Amino acid sequence: MFDSNTTPKYQRMLESELERVLINLKTEMVSTEDYKKTLSLVEKLHALMDKEKPRAVSKDAMLNVAANLVGIILIIRHENVNVIASKALQFVVRTKV
């Protein structure tokens, strides 16, 4: 489901289009107007590919989630052993969106 090795369809399409434009760029003469147009198209495709990349989850966020889960598990275990009703869940850090 969350396999990072598979690339989305739009990413593959952008890569194939970029490859096609680069092959076309090799055939153009550097001093022509077509070369400049093709080069600007390459720059636009690169910008699209950079913008479309998914953002990775930061290590700080993952550490925060893991710490919260450990805290919740510890609170639940403590309340299973000591049947005192507490409001211990208020100490769990809430995420700021």
Image (spheres, grey):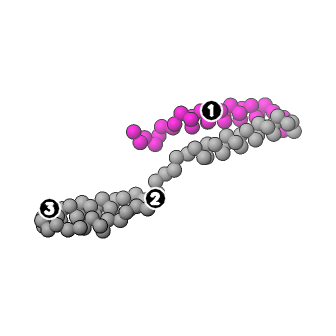
How many numbered discs sit on the rendered protein? 3
Label pair 1/3, CB-CB below 8 angstroms? no
For badge 2, the amino acid type reads Val
Q: Residue at x 24, y 60 (%)?
A: 73
Which residue corresponds to mark 3?
Answer: 80
**Magenta region, main secondary structure:** helix
Residue 43: name its quadrant.
top right
Asked if the stretch drawn in magenta spans residue 17, the answer is yes
The residue lying toward the viewer, choosing from 5 and 86, is 86
Above-or-below relation of 19 to 4:
above
Q: Which residues are magenta?
A: 1-30
Please provide percent x and percent y for residue 24.
Answer: 74, 31
Tell me the number on the disc at residue 25.
none
Which residue corresponds to mark 1?
Answer: 16
For badge 1, the amino acid type reads Ser
Please provide percent x and percent y for residue 92.
Answer: 32, 65
Q: Mark 3 packing: few (<14 Cα in 10 Å), some, or many (20+)?
A: few
Q: Residue at x 34, y 59 (%)?
A: 66
The residue lying toward the viewer, choosing from 53 and 85, is 85
Please provide percent x and percent y for residue 2.
Answer: 41, 42
